[in-house]
Amino acid sequence: MSQDRAPALPAAGAALQPLELLWAQCPTCWGQRKIWEPQEAANGEGVILVAHACDGCLGIGEVIR
Ligand SMILES: [Zn+2]
């Protein structure tokens, strides 16, 4: 009996290159992760600054380029 050679497997590493995720500082909040917005205070104190999560990076502070 002759030994059959196993078929050559394609090089796994060739097709699976690691994705290079480039994180960059969010241009919307400048990496602060939140946006401060003036808002009318409910108790009549006038206008106060209220922070909410940044829309550009969803509160992460960085975005993938
Ligand atoms: Zn942001």
Image (cartoon, helix red, strand yellow):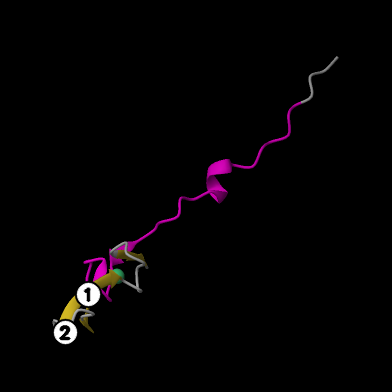
Q: Is residue 12 magenta?
A: yes
Q: Nearer the viewer, residue 27 or 22?
A: 27
- Residue drawn at x 22%, y 74% is 50
Ligand 1, image quadrant it occupies: bottom left
Residue 28 sits in quarter: bottom left
Q: Which residue is mark 1?
A: 50
Q: Is residue 60 left or right of residue 15?
A: left
Task: Using the image, determine if residue 9 lies above or below residue 6.
Answer: below
- Picture mark count: 2
- Residue drawn at x 23%, y 66% is 31
Q: Which residue is mark 2?
A: 47
Residue 54, image x, y percentages = 31, 71
Give the residue type at disc 1.
Answer: Val
Residue 37, image x, y percentages = 23, 80
In which quadrant of the rendered image does the N terminus lie? top right
Within 10 angstroms of label 2, few (less than 14), some, or many (20 or more) residues? few
Q: Is residue 64 left or right of residue 34?
A: right
Q: Nearer the viewer, residue 29 or 9?
A: 29
Residue 19, image x, y percentages = 45, 55
Magenta part, dominant SS? loop
